[in-house]
Image (cartoon, grey):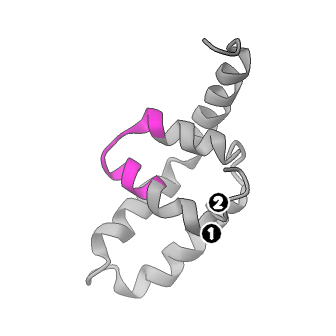
Amino acid sequence: MSRWPPTASLPLALWLWKRAWLNPLGLLLARLQVDEEDHRFWKTAQALLEIEKPLANGPLAEEFQNLGQLLTSKRSLSTRAKNVAESEQMRLPGM
């Protein structure tokens, strides 16, 4: 899963974010190894936000808002992903 391109994982991340499912979102980001604020996942999200900016008051208004909120929270989400990844490494196989 860590080899998924950010464009493939971003819609799922936005879907989880919109529903405030932070634990599954943290798990997704951990699996994608999005544990740094300068990860390409965040760069892709930022680029998409800039592309959608002209449509912010139109048909993409809700997605634009959710994407902006997701990016605003990238530090805490990256930390959550790092914590999830560390806790998964501490588990014993089969538990």
Q: Is residue 32 magenta?
A: no
Q: Nearer the viewer, residue 88 or 50?
A: 88
Q: Is residue 75 left or right of residue 56?
A: right
Under circle 1, the secondary element is helix
Q: Give me the residue at 72% from left, 55% from top.
A: 39
Q: Is residue 3 above or below residue 48?
A: above
Q: Give me the residue at 67% from left, 33% from top.
A: 82
**Residues in magenta, as a range:** 13-24
Label of residue 53 in the image:
none
Q: Nearer the viewer, residue 26 or 71?
A: 26
Q: Which residue is tagged 2?
A: 41
Say which quarter of the image contains residue 21.
top left
Q: Give me the residue at 63% from left, 60% from top.
A: 42
Q: Is residue 21 magenta?
A: yes
**CA–CA distance between discs 2 and 1?**
5 Å
Residue 84's x, y, as percent?
61, 28
Under circle 2, the secondary element is helix
Locate the C terminus and report the quarter of the image it occupies.
top right
What secondary structure do most residues of the magenta stretch adopt?
A: helix
Q: Amino acid at mark 2?
A: Phe
Q: Is residue 87 left or right of residue 51?
A: right
The local crowd at label 2, few if under 14, some if 14 to 19, many if 20 or more residues have their Cα within 10 Å, is many
Q: Is residue 21 above or below residue 9?
A: above
Q: Amino acid at mark 1?
A: Thr
The local crowd at label 1, few if under 14, some if 14 to 19, many if 20 or more residues have their Cα within 10 Å, is some
Q: Give me the residue at 56% from left, 48% from top.
A: 74
Asked if the residue under mark 1 is in contact with the one under mark 2, i.e. CB atoms within 8 Å, the reply is: yes
Q: Which residue is tagged 1?
A: 44
Q: Nearer the viewer, residue 50 or 27?
A: 27
